[in-house]
Amino acid sequence: MSFEILKTNKEYDVVIVGSGAGGGMSAKILADAGLAVAVMEAGGDFDPAKEEYRTQLRWPWESPRRGAGSTRPFGDFDAAWGGWDIDGEPYTRKNGTEFDWFRSRMLGGRTNHWGRISLRFGPKDFKRKDHDGMGANWPIGYEDVKPYYDKVDKLIGVFGTNEGLENDPDGYFLPPPKPRLHELYIKKGGEKAGVPVIPMRKSVLTRPINTERGVCFYCNQCNRACSAYADFSSSTALMKPAMQQGTVDLYTNAMVREVTTDSKGLATGISYVSKEDMQEYKIKAKVVVLGASACESARIMLNSKSSAHPDGLGNGSGMIGRYLHDSTGASRAAIMPDLIDRERYNEDGVGGAHVYSPWWLDGEKLDFTRGYHLEFGGGMGMPNYGFGFGMDSMRHYIKDEMGNPSVNGGYGKGLKKDIRKIYGSTIGVAGRGESVPQYDNYCEIDPDTVDQYGIPVLRFNYNWTEHEVNQAKHMQETFEEVLTGMGGILLGNKPGEEDNYGLAAPGRIIHEVGTTRMGDDPSTSVLNKHSQAHECKNLFVVDGGQFVSQADKNPTWTILALSWRASDYIVDQLKKQNLR
Amino acid sequence: MDRREHLRLLVSGSFGAGFFLNEPAEISKEDIETSKKIIRENGGGYGRTDAEIKRDERLHAASFFTEHELKTVAVLSDIIIPADDVSGSATDAGVPEFMEFIMKDMPYLQTPTRGGIMWLDNESKKRFGKVFINTSSKQQLELVDDIAYPDDAKPEMEYGVNFFNRMRNLTATGFFTTEMGIKDMGYKGNQANIWDGVPENVLKKHGISYDKKTLEECVRNSERGIVAKWDDDMNLIRE
């Protein structure tokens, strides 16, 4: 990190906060346009091709806890640093409500963790109010974003198939990998349940898209970050080429406190705390781009108070932090008698499932308004911490040569044999659904709490509505139909009303968006349709904060498209000198 | 110990828990410091952050089980996973050492495990007048039989059943996540390869097949090295 830059009083064209999907894409586009860019990253540098960071192709015994999630919630080998709890960086909740906030402090942010599921929003997803009267429409439509989805497909690479589905648009897809054995059973189960099962859409390179990044070698470990750069993470696919342009300065371990403004209320740059020396520094720039994540960007804006912006920067409407919403999530598992005692072969494939189910009941009369898609798990994966658990309740599904079932629990050679037999015979199915954004679900600044850098922290208030609960109930019905349809025996009990039908707490699906939403009306939205703050024309937000509604699609592909679109607009407006 | 030797140990995974705790005489303090430095410079051997490396070091330096407890864990784990004609036993695979680490890593396991071992010894003393590990194998199994089968166990055995379930879980995981255990399980992955679908004989055995659409749309080996191009209608140009 170079503080000399500060001493020379350098003014950047743009300072970007965050190096994940939103910030990384913006850095790439602005650097390609020849602009001088500073990127502020709250965590450390990261490159999965470097041995010191590598978790890919490691064996469970290389970790003394065999990959358990003691310090990383998705296990030792998950690439993402951080999680729902980070030492010294608390957040709080109010009114007894739940919200869990996942943060990843490192170059590339949470793109180092995600499942690479890359789904475009469809035309209906931008106009949900037109269809169900709830929430709000986006100020833009699919036709505005489509050219950018097209460009993202080609720049980053995504496999999938053109199915001609109305609300799950076609794309520039690479060929998908063939389904695994259990996924062929899932297709059968889907057919019986009337649920379509089609090839997954993931940003994993089954074929090269350029000469810089490698091709997938099928180790199933995208979540560990790919040393061949064959999957998408912002650090490898965006920040690396952006840095190569020579006009980008990356500041790591730089925890941004606020956006600084002048007497007219325009942004002049940012101030940050260096985690290395705990000192405060300033960066000057003509334009500020926030891509720190929906909640972190909202936090920075709310903490940026001045006489021109007494309630936080761009918060005259009081909308910052409002309409916070995450995807819904629920799941169920089954054991497949047909897959017990199966033949061994390498079926690692790409990271996660090769098939999925897009929402199939759009327009049907249901007691909830918005849809969900299905994700699947299973197969002969690498044993890690937790492998072999549960024989006290699952062993009776195993039968001996005479067809006699084993007794639950036990020990000895027979137990050892049965653990071998059960390997690769369980299947999981999960739903990921769209929730209805609520004014009363929000994050705000907690007046009583600061983090270890002295920056006031977020406080959350969040309640699911009947729409999400009823949707989870419907998911549970679907899970049972699909799992039993493929010949599976359901495991565990069906979650009921008392458990919200297994609906995950908000924040657990890590798709939270909406805190700085777009809109044409400055009194009900924070950003205009160019991702530009209504009340501060040289401030842009390029992360999930700008979402008016989070479809049942995973948000990353839309963050990338919107960030590219906003960055094109910034280049154009800088040229026209409209941002001063 | 030189750097290469150290890295070999790291890579082979024989660098296990307890290294810092039990410093063999032939390894000097200086070597230990060098080792720590190498681990730190190499991300702790498995891609650790600085905070995680420090945490690992702290856990390795501490100890939890008493000698008696560790012996009990060893006996129990070998009852749960004994050697057979495929692979060795739990202790052959280092399960007690794994358990020692996991107790420190997941402190919520400490009291139930320590308490469970005491329960086992008490029960054993009541029945046979000796602590568990000092009884005969026959007596050990007689006691274990009362807590190993949750569906049939007597209500007064419930605590023992829960303890044994946990020991079964940790032993199975501790065994099958070692090199020996993974070889036993027959997991074939974690290496560069080409996924070209389910082997033909397996498909046949399951009476299942790929449909024509799937075979046509999925990736082919022959195009793996060719940079993708599309026509104006978003169709991938196939070779």
Image (cartoon, coloured by chain):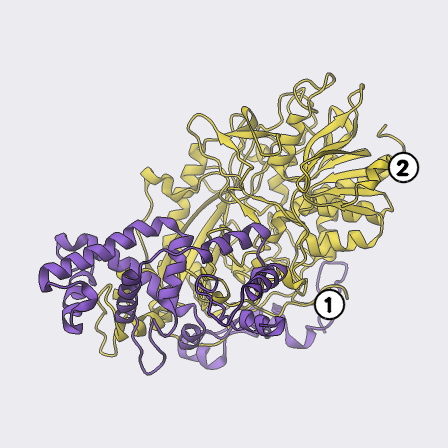
Chain colours: A yellow, B purple
Residue at 40% in and 77% down: B184
Q: Is residue A64 above or below residue B189?
A: above
Residue at 48% in and 74% down: B209
Q: Chain of mark 2?
A: A
- Disc number placed over residue A575 in the picture, else none: 2
- Asked whether B71 or A467 is in front, the reply is B71
Q: Classify residue A65 as left or right of residue A106.
A: left
Figure quadrant of the C terminus of chain A: top right
List x then y, in percent, for residue A267: 78, 28
Q: Classify residue A443 as left or right of residue A238.
A: left
Pointer 1 residue: B237
Cβ atoms under marks 1 and 2 closer than 8 Å: no
Residue under disc 1 on the same chain as residue under disc 2: no
Mark 2, secondary structure of its residue:
helix
**In the picture, residue A288 is in which quadrant?**
top right
- Asked whether A516 or B122 is in front, the reply is B122
Q: Classify residue A364 as left or right of residue A278.
A: left
Q: Chain of mark 1?
A: B
Count of numbered circles in the view: 2
Q: Is residue B135 above or below residue A103?
A: below
- Identified by mark 2, the residue type is Lys
